[in-house]
């Protein structure tokens, strides 16, 4: 099948479809133009509630931290206390308590350094912190899923430019991981192999969608990508969780994350916004042999630093649609340097 015409692609990881319309990439843009983020931030901002030594909105004061810094979110979306669950009143009006915990993880004391600008050691410390927080939260009886994520840039809703991530832990397995649990289990049942092990094998063989890879993980624009420059990072070894990674895997994964985010910044020579999140197996005490640890990067920008993709009419009502093909996006990201444009 030629892929120059409108076609739909199956997302093997969610069981959903995406419409690809390659010919539409040339259409003129008269829509919203985004404001560029400021190029130069101070290394310390006295008004920032995440900088070392500063007061937070909740009244607490940050210590003079020197590495990653973790605290309970002052405005947490989830709280550990919850009323006992009661049976639903009807099939139409269902609700359930959702006990959980939300934490904020500042990457470093530096107000101005994002992931690609941090040293290899500093990114390893961030990963080690995600791993330690995951282990700590997963140890609680009422926690069954731990979601680590970063919203980078005002366009992704980041409320503070100080580079930070979040970890939300909850009692229920979340919507997106629940879909991936079903597809991975169904693939294993049908083919007797792991979906993502097979997928990474096929992608590294063809290389058309691979952006960059090392001995530990592969970064690629997935065949079924929805966002223009979406990237999927898959561990080479079949592991279920961050807490299963060895020290050398943490180091390799840190290196790969730095490369991906550096290429993102180099794409339009600006601090590139995205949401990044890890998808580990649930932590409800059951074994999940079919689960394969991976991370998603969902960046909103489309054709320049100021034109973003909107998820609107067709996306909201029907299905996601994209213009630039995943192969074109991968080629562009692959052609970029691993040296950050501000460090040249
Ligand atoms: Zn700050
Ligand atoms: Zn696997
Ligand atoms: Zn996933």
Image (cartoon, helix red, strand yellow):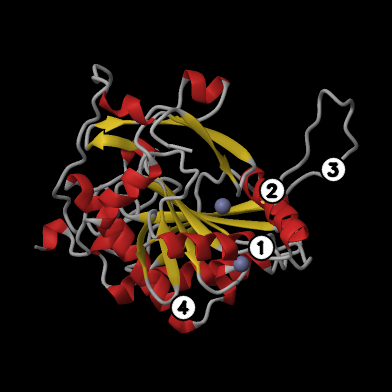
| Mark whose residue sits in front, 4 or 3 | 4
Secondary structure of the residue carrying numbered label 3: loop
- Please identify the residue farthest to the front as the structure is shown: 1
Secondary structure of the residue carrying numbered label 4: helix
Query: Mark 1–mark 2 contact, CB under 8 Å?
Result: no
Query: Nearer the N terminus, badge 2 or badge 3?
Result: 3
Query: Mark 2–mark 4 contact, CB under 8 Å?
Result: no
Query: Nearer the N terminus, badge 1 or badge 2?
Result: 2
Q: Give the vertical position of 209 relative to 88 (above or below).
A: below
| Mark whose residue sits in front, 3 or 1 | 1
Query: Mark 3–mark 1 contact, CB under 8 Å?
Result: no
| Mark whose residue sits in front, 2 or 3 | 2
Query: Nearer the N terminus, badge 3 or badge 1?
Result: 3
Mark 2 sits near ligand 3, with its Cβ under 8 Å away? no
Q: Give the vertical position of 210 relative to 237 (above or below).
A: above
Q: Quadrant of the C terminus?
A: bottom left
Query: Mark 4–mark 3 contact, CB under 8 Å?
Result: no
According to the picture, the residue beneath numbered tag 4 turns out to be 249
Q: Give the vertical position of 230 relative to 126 (above or below).
A: above
Query: Nearer the N terminus, badge 2 or badge 4?
Result: 2
Residue at x-position 58% and y-position 41%: 10
- Please identify the residue farthest to the left as the structure is shown: 344
- Check residue 85 in the rendering and tell me which mark sits there, or answer none: 3
Residue at x-position 48% and y-position 38%: 1
According to the picture, the residue beneath numbered tag 1 turns out to be 291
Residue at x-position 69% and y-position 53%: 181
Query: Taking 21 as reference, is 118 left or right?
Result: left
Is residue 114 visible to the viewer in this orientation of the structure? no
Estimate the spatial distance between the alpha carbons at disc 2 and disc 3, rounded to whole Å. 21 Å
Estimate the spatial distance between the alpha carbons at disc 4 and disc 3, rounded to whole Å. 40 Å
Estimate the spatial distance between the alpha carbons at disc 1 and disc 2, rounded to whole Å. 11 Å
């Amino acid at each position: 099948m030629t892929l120059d015409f409108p076609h739909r692609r199956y997302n093997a990881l969610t069981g959903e479809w995406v419409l690809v319309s390659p010919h539409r990439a040339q259409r003129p843009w008269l829509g919203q133009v985004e404001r560029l983020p400021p190029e130069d931030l101070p290394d310390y901002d006295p008004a920032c509630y995440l900088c070392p030594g500063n007061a937070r909105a909740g009244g607490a004061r940050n210590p003079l931290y020197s590495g990653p810094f973790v605290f309970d979110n002052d405005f947490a979306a989830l709280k550990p206390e919850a009323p006992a669950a009661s049976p639903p009143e009807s099939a139409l009006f269902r609700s359930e308590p959702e006990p959980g915990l939300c934490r904020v993880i500042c990457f470093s004391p530096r107000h101005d350094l994002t992931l690609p600008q941090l040293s290899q050691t500093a990114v390893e410390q961030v990963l080690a912190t995600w791993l330690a927080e995951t282990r700590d939260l997963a140890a609680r009886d009422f926690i069954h899923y731990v979601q680590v994520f970063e919203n980078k840039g005002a366009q992704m809703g980041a409320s503070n430019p100080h580079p930070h991530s979040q970890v939300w832990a909850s009692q229920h397995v979340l919507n997106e991981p629940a879909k991936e649990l079903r597809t991975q289990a169904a693939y294993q049942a049908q083919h007797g192999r792991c979906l993502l092990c097979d997928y990474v094998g096929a992608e590294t063989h063809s290389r058309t969608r691979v952006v960059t890879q090392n001995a530990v993980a592969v970064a690629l624009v997935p065949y079924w990508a929805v966002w223009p420059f979406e990237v999927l990072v898959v561990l080479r070894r079949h592991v279920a969780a961050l807490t299963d990674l060895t020290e050398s895997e943490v180091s390799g994964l840190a290196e790969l994350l730095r490369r991906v985010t550096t290429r993102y910044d180099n794409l339009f020579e600006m601090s590139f916004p995205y949401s990044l999140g890890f998808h580990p197996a649930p932590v409800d005490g059951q074994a999940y042999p079919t689960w394969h640890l991976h991370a998603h990067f969902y960046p909103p920008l489309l054709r320049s630093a100021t034109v973003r993709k909107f998820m609107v009419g067709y996306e909201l009502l029907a299905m996601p649609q994209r213009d630039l093909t995943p192969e074109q996006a991968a080629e562009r990201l692959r052609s970029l340097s691993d040296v950050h444009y501000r460090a040249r």
